[in-house]
Every structure is written in C-alpha cells, then in structure tokens.
Image: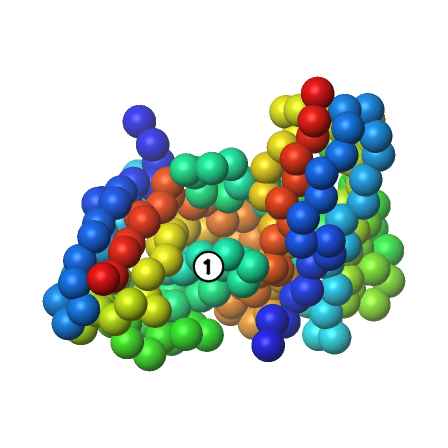
C-alpha cells in the first residue's frame, strides 16, 4: 500500500465550485505539505503544517485553505475554483529532525484538477 | 520569479551520451535535493547535498553542490532509456522547500 495517498486522482469542476482535495499518510510523519505543479514552473508550495495545530502559508496560498484533521490527514480546499487553478496538486510529508531525514519529502501520486 | 532556475528545460539525447543539468540561484540554501518524477507519479528523492563543494555519486549519476551553496549540478554518464523523466532540484530555506523549474530528459534508444 502507498504511504501517501491522495483523493481524488482526477477531478473536473466548474468555476465557482468549492473543491476539497484530501491527503492521508501512514508514514507517521509530523510534517505535511501541499504543492501545485504547472508546466515550466516546477512545484510551488501552497501550505504546510508541522503538526495538527500548526498551519503556515507557502508561496501561493491565495485562493486556497487547508485543514489538518489529524497527524495523518491534511486537506486542501479551493473555496471558489477558478480556471487558473487548473494544475497537478501534490501532497508531501517529511519527518521532523530526530524522526528521520527532514530534507526528504515523500510525495503522493498527485491530483489532476481541471477548472472549466 | 523562480528562486531556483534549472537548465536546460528540455533535453533529448541518444542512449550512451553524457549530460549535465544545472540548478542555479542567488540564494544560499541549507541543503539541496534532486528528485526524479515519472508521468502520473510524484517526485522521488535521488539525493540530498548539504555541504558546500560536496560531491555525491549514485551509480551513473553525479551530484555536486556549489561551494557557496547557491547552485548544484547533476551529471549522468552513459544515459539509458530508463533515465527518462523530469528532474527537479529543490532547496531548503527556513522551513520551506523551493523547487526548480524542472528538466525534462528523454533518452532515445
């Protein structure tokens, strides 16, 4: 079984709709991240969380919100989707120092989101 | 503006050739990672470099971290079709990771 899972894997939605992308991990890591990937731009950080009560904005948080429901679960929401949020979204985890190598990120398989 | 710039963006070479991918920035990073990503999957870590001037080898792949910890290179010797994929560098700065723009490598049999 995959250590980091994302649901859904693909989603097509319309402008203005609210969308939630979910991420679960069985690695026992404290730290979780949400990225979006666009061609020619690499991955850009949206939000990250170092534990259940810790939420931090990344480079491109506008238009997104997150919820850390448990150590193993981190959800990303688009409150009112717009076409330029069409992208590939990845969830990742890292261990905290002492738990493992904090530089190694473990990625989920991604969610391809299309906003029409 | 991207914090990390990779070059080239696309690379198509014949099997057996050598290649180098570059990752450059004006910022100093505490560590730098190289990832490889295949279609439909998330990136997978290849290596982490931490010390300025550090060189790491992983079979036919050689990774170097610049002396000033602002840049890095990935050299592949005798490329094989199995090396095809998207190569991403990422730098750790504070609590965040910043990714490069990516290099899409195609190795033609």
**Secondary structure of residue under mark 1:** strand
Residue A51 in picture, x, y percent from top left? 32, 62
Label 1 Cα neighbours within 10 Å, binned few <14 / some 14-19 / many ≥20: some
The residue sitting at 41% across, 74% down in the picture is A60
Q: From what the image shows, is residue A14 above or below residue A59?
A: above
Residue that lies at the very extreme toward the left in this rendered image: A17
Observer able to see residue A68: no
Residue A54 in picture, x, y percent from top left? 31, 70
Residue that lies at the very extreme toward the front in this rendered image: A116
Q: Nearer the viewer, residue B41 or A69?
A: B41
Q: Quadrant of the C terminus of chain A?
A: bottom left
Q: Nearer the viewer, residue B97 or A63?
A: A63
Mark 1 lies on residue: A38
Q: Is residue A100 left or right of residue B47?
A: left
Q: From what the image shows, is residue A5 above or below residue A103?
A: above
Residue A77 placement: quadrant:
bottom left
The residue sitting at 25% across, 45% down in the picture is A10
> What colouring style does the render use?
rainbow
């Amino acid at each position: 079984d995959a250590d980091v899972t994302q649901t859904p894997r693909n989603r097509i939605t319309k402008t203005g709709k609210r969308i939630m992308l979910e991420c679960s991990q069985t690695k026992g890591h404290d730290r979780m991240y949400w990225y979006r990937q666009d061609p020619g731009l690499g991955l850009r950080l949206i939000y990250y969380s170092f534990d259940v009560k810790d939420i931090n904005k990344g480079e491109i948080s506008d238009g997104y919100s997150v919820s850390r429901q448990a150590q193993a679960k981190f959800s990303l929401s688009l409150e009112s989707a717009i076409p330029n949020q069409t992208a590939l979204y990845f969830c990742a985890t890292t261990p905290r120092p002492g738990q493992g190598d904090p530089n190694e990120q473990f990625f989920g398989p991604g969610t391809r989101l299309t906003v029409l | 503006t991207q914090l990390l710039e990779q070059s080239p963006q696309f690379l198509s070479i014949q099997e057996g050739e050598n290649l180098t991918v570059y990752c450059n920035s004006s910022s100093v990073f505490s560590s730098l990672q190289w990832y490889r990503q295949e279609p439909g999957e998330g990136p997978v870590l290849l290596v982490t470099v931490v010390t300025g001037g550090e060189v790491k080898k992983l079979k036919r792949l050689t990774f170097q971290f610049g002396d000033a910890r602002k840049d890095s290179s990935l050299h592949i010797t005798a490329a094989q079709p199995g090396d095809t994929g998207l190569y991403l560098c990422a730098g750790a700065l504070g609590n965040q990771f910043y990714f490069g723009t990516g290099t899409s490598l195609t190795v033609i049999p």
